[in-house]
Image (cartoon, coloured by chain):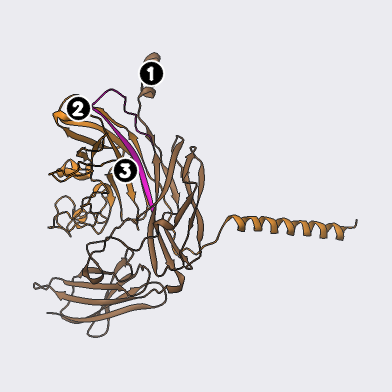
Chain colours: A brown, B orange
Amino acid sequence: MRKLFVLCTFCFLLLPSPLFASIEIDPMRMELQADSGKPIAGYISITNRGNENIDISLSPGEYRYMFSVETIYPKNSEPQTLPSCKNWINLKPDKVKLEKGKTQQIQYSINVPSSAKNEYVAAILIDEEQPAAPIEPGTAGQVRIKITPRINIPVYVEIKDSLKMSCEITNLEAVSSKNKKFVWFSAAVKNSGTVHIRPTVTLTIIDQYKTVVKKIPLGKTLPIFAGFAERLTAEWVPDFTGKYTVVATADIGTENFAQKSAEFDVK
Amino acid sequence: MNNTIKTAIIASLTVCMLAFTAGTCLAKRTIIPVRGKVNSFGTYSFTGKLDFDIKKSGEQNIGKIIVEGVYNGEYPWIMRVYTDNTNYTGIASAARPQNQSGLISTDGRFSIPLLVDAPIMMFSNYRVVPDINQSNYKPYIPDKINRAMPYTDCIIMAIDPRNEVWVAGENSILFDKDDNISGDMTSATPMEINFKARFDEKAVSTNYTANLYIEILTCP
């Protein structure tokens, strides 16, 4: 039995299955402010939580979008790119052999040109490098795939000289359904500043006696870039008929917030 | 030397040491204003290899990757798979549209679509792995019920409460007991991702490579 166990273990060890170990990255997002013409720098720490030594490479990349279907693009056209700062980013070192359990500090520096204004985005791509098996010469029909696990860190660089955070609610609709079972709300929050915002939006419903009957938190949005807007929707089931007012509040955390109201009837 | 002088010397030495330490720390670290910070709480690991020898034509399994672990980062996030085949050249003046996704012949001229299957794909089964450089590549945006999937991204796992199809659950109806409120499309691990490709008779005459990325696209 013991011999069988040893044999099985030996056979298992001989299996050529590379292990891509776990890594932890801190921070997972960089929202930086910079003066135009002045470089900024800092550190990213990477920890190998796996049980094998690993090779890691880092490179700047383009920002990875995660827009929603409710994103309203500037001038109603879907832009493929936001202003990029990919070429401003330097990483030192950009290749690391990381022993298990160890942490490595990676220095990043971002060379902001003097002409920069408003906001730029990019990503830092962190790859666990694992070479593919080589193709043996003289034999056809071989398929060799290099597998690379990748994590990205989004990077936002805001230029201080032109930094303005503001938003407005451009549209607020309240539509009572025909069968009167619910009211549908839609609020469009537009970024009227120069850098991205993450507003927290709330709907407050007030009845004809000025009593707050419901507060509907719509949560914190993903980044809304300058000139972009995001449409947020909610539904509410009223208990009573009557005249109501809905107030949408978008708070961007800068002690100023945007509000808009609309009236509606529940018959 | 009396006690007062001793105390003064020790105090001045301490101040010098603190000043030196602070100076070196400040020299090493640049303080920058950061508006937000997110820590990671873990990630996935991937075991397996995709090495395959074409013995015959037809659709064949190439191999599998086993995913283990958990990623507890802020959501929405997605794990997607794509190729980044920078070695693809294609055929000059080819009549048919060319695509750099999948497996690329070692001379860079030909490609074979690579298919992937993961538990999230459920009924749709194997999907084509896109190449991030292909002209019609469209990154993920959340699905809406009754609308065709508007992206070419190939999702392996994800959490996105904005995705109506995921939130609606198996019966595809929103606002019922079946709802998956956070749009959690992660799978229990260990989990298999399987790959296959269809090889024609000519495929055996050359070799193929691909640069395959499994990317966790973190919350922006």
Q: Amino acid at mark 2?
A: Val
Q: Quadrant of the C terminus of chain A?
A: bottom left
Residue B157 has which mark?
none
Residue B213 has which mark?
3
Residue range in magenta is A130-153
| Chain under callout 3 | B
What residue did someone put label 1 on?
A5
Q: Residue at x 41, y 70 (%)?
A: A117
What residue did someone put label 2 on?
B204
**Where's residue A88, x and y in %?**
44, 58
Q: Is residue A55 above or below residue A75?
A: above
Q: Secondary structure at mark 3?
A: strand
| Residue farthest along the right direction in this orientation | B1
Mark 3 to mark 1 CA distance (whole Å): 36 Å
Residue B129: which quarter of the image? top left
Q: Quadrant of the N terminus of chain A?
A: top left
Do callouts 3 and 1 point to residues on the same chain? no
